[in-house]
Image (cartoon, rainbow, N blue to C red):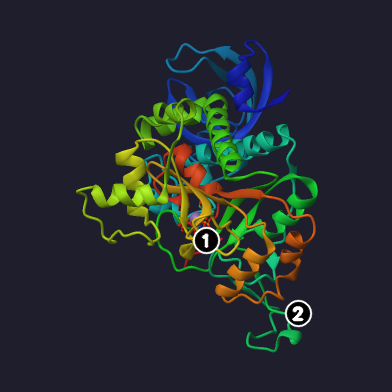
Amino acid sequence: MKQRISAVLGEQPVGQKIVINGWIRTKRDTGGFSFLEVNDGSCLANLQVIADKSLSNYEEDISRISTGCSVTVEGIVKESPAKGQSVELHAESVVVVGWAEPETYPLQKKRHSFEFLREMSHLRPRTNALGAVARVRSRLSWAINQFFQERGFLQVHTPIITTSDCEGAGEMFQVNTSSEISGKADKEEFFGKKAGLTVSGQLQAEVYALALGNVYTFGPTFRAENSHTSRHLSEFWMIEPEMAFCDLQCNMQLATEMLKYVLNDALENCPEDMELFDKFIEKGLIAKLKNVVEKEFAHITYSDAVEKLLASDKKFEFPVKWGIDLQSEHERYLTEEVFKCPLIVTDYPATIKPFYMRVNDDGKTVAAMDILVPGIGEIVGGSQREERLEVLEKRMIEAGIETEEYSWYLDLRRYGSVPHSGYGLGFERLVLFVTGMANIREVIPFPRTPGFAPC
Ligand code: ATP
Ligand code: MN
């Protein structure tokens, strides 16, 4: 029976005949046997295959096997006398499905740097660390969907091509046909007006929230910003729940519950991969995440956060005063050194936040909330949305936005408006936090950053 290696190592079907497929990680020959370490991507561990010299294709094939070859092995599962593994496979047949030239195969046994591997997005998932990232990423995606579905949220697929050109979240990539050049009159454009790749599905998610109650989107977003940090990508995935009849408090509660839920899920369901990260990538990672799951998140208003920053002896590159947007160095100081746990910052100055955030009674701040985590800074950005037509219109005009272009958005306030809230969770920032990896380029299969998009 054909089996995945994770199932073989889990169920240990000693005495049974099985078939496995995979790629050779290493091979060594001793005393009339070849020991093949085979990995099929289903789990971190390899299955050790023992191939006897008496196998008919030993000289011709098995003796020539090298790292990177793909094989199909049929054999009997036996208890393993070797340390560190429970079972091994005694081969009755080994078929080489695809050869890998040993002189040129780039993934040799030694450890490669992540920078080196980045140049090889087509081969890097065959390494232990990147394979583990792919499994944890998949699990987190599943857990997020499960979290929302269990709570009755409906998933909405918001468009990737958008014509709302000032969503306030960042620079947009333009979408044109190959024969089109930008600068045309709007009506000559493919969509009859300028179009771009979405920077956020929020505005469209609001449409569905105001019809269906609780919804979420989980899709790719694009930002044409020239950022070269270890936290920014040009293409990244975002989870954006949007809830009708929900204020900032309820928004904060959902985001906190969601983060705790998905961290716990990864710890429970990816123990082997998490141990790898804990051992080789970030020492103490598992304890850190468990602590986040168990402890309450801290909460501070923007104004109090500014007071804390002003009172500290720390030298910041960007000077602090009320009204500035918090920089990554400020965010990280607060969450890593002051609170030492996830921190929710609320009520930012209206001047630094987009037009759709609800204006507070003080007239100066908005009902925004960012969640900051140690090691990363902002992981979630959200707010209660402005549901009052006149206030929203005034904010749009102040921001220089054509209200006519947004008549659909204003209609939501004209007809059956309700208090509503939502947030954006950057999926790769979450995967960074959970795996402890240092650079966001390692936690998305095919990273896109300015000047970089190899395959
Ligand atoms: P930052 O201040 O870190 O640049 P932002 O304020 O522009 O982020 P939002 O517009 O609030 O981000 O987007 C919501 C979430 O999306 C952020 O909290 C973050 O987790 C994630 N995010 C934003 N920009 C990027 C990016 N360029 N690459 C990866 N994730 C991102
Ligand atoms: Mn933000």
Could you classify mark 1 by the number of other residues whose Cα lies within 10 Å: few (under 14), some (14-19), or many (20 or more)? some
Residues under labels 1 and 2: Cα distance?
26 Å
- On the image, numbered disc 1 is attached to which residue? 448
Give the x, y percent position of residue 258.
58, 36
* The quadrant where residue 227 appears: bottom left
Query: In the drawing, does residue 414 fall left or right of residue 278?
Result: right
Q: Which residue lies furthest to the front in this view?
A: 361
- The answer to whether 252 is drawn above or below residue 310 in the figure is above
The circle drawn on residue 190 is: 2
Whether residue 35 appears in this view of the structure is no
Q: Does any portion of residue 254 appear in the rendered image?
A: yes
Seen at 74% across and 50% down, the residue is 209
Element under disc 1: loop
Closest to the observer, 145 or 150 = 150
Rendered image quadrant of residue 207? bottom right
Disc 1 C-beta below 8 A from ligand 1: no
Q: Do the residues labelled 1 and 2 touch (CB within 8 Å)?
A: no
Callout 2: few (<14), some (14-19), or many (20+) C-alpha neighbours within 10 Å?
few
Is residue 177 or residue 376 the one in the foreground?
376
Which quarter of the image is occupied by the N terminus? top right
Q: What residue type is labelled 1?
A: Arg
